[in-house]
Image (cartoon, rainbow, N blue to C red):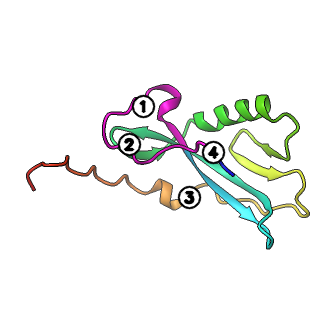
Amino acid sequence: MAYSLGNFATYGRFNLSGPLGLGMVLEAELGPAGRFLGGRLLPTRQLGEGVPVPDRRGEAVRLVRRLSRADFPGGPFTILPGGRLFSRRAVRPLPPLPPTVPALDAPALPSRPAVGAAQ
């Protein structure tokens, strides 16, 4: 399970300062039986009301690495500084991942009009 990756549905009054404005997308590779083999964390930052954008500074990755080392020392996977994940129990090395994910690099969608706004 992957907990607390972030919330992309922040229309309304949410505090997005500091770590509250961070999120991420988890890209995971699973084996045929559903076992985690590896993947990467793609960090995001929440700008305004519900507009996630890629976080080039990778703050969410640094935060997750720090919390994971504190909460799960010697756990079954490793998070590298760039967000690459790999299982210490993987049976084969994984091929390198492409440097970016087009969906995250796409322009942000426009904000939705406020409820009750004139159309």
- Residue carrying label 1: 16
The vertical placement of 71 against 36, above or below, is: above
The vertical placement of 46 against 108, above or below, is: above
- Whether residues under marks 2 and 1 lie with C-beta atoms below 8 angstroms apart, the answer is yes
Q: Position of residue 41 (x, y in %)?
A: 64, 48
Find numbered disc 4 in the image and state the secondary structure of the residue it sits on. loop
Q: Taken as a whole, is the magenta stretch helix, strand or loop?
A: loop
Residue under the point 76% across and 42% down:
80
The magenta stretch is 3-23
Find numbered disc 1 in the image and state the secondary structure of the residue it sits on. loop
Upstream in the sequence, badge 3 or badge 4?
Answer: 4
- Residue carrying label 2: 10
Dot 2 amino acid type: Thr
Q: Where's the C terminus, which quadrant? A: bottom left
Q: Callout 1 environment at 10 Å: few (<14), some (14 to 19), or many (20+)?
A: some
- Residue carrying label 4: 3
Marks 2/4: CA–CA distance: 17 Å
Find numbered disc 3 in the image and state the secondary structure of the residue it sits on. loop
The label on residue 101 is 3
Dot 1 amino acid type: Leu
Q: Callout 3 environment at 10 Å: few (<14), some (14 to 19), or many (20+)?
A: few
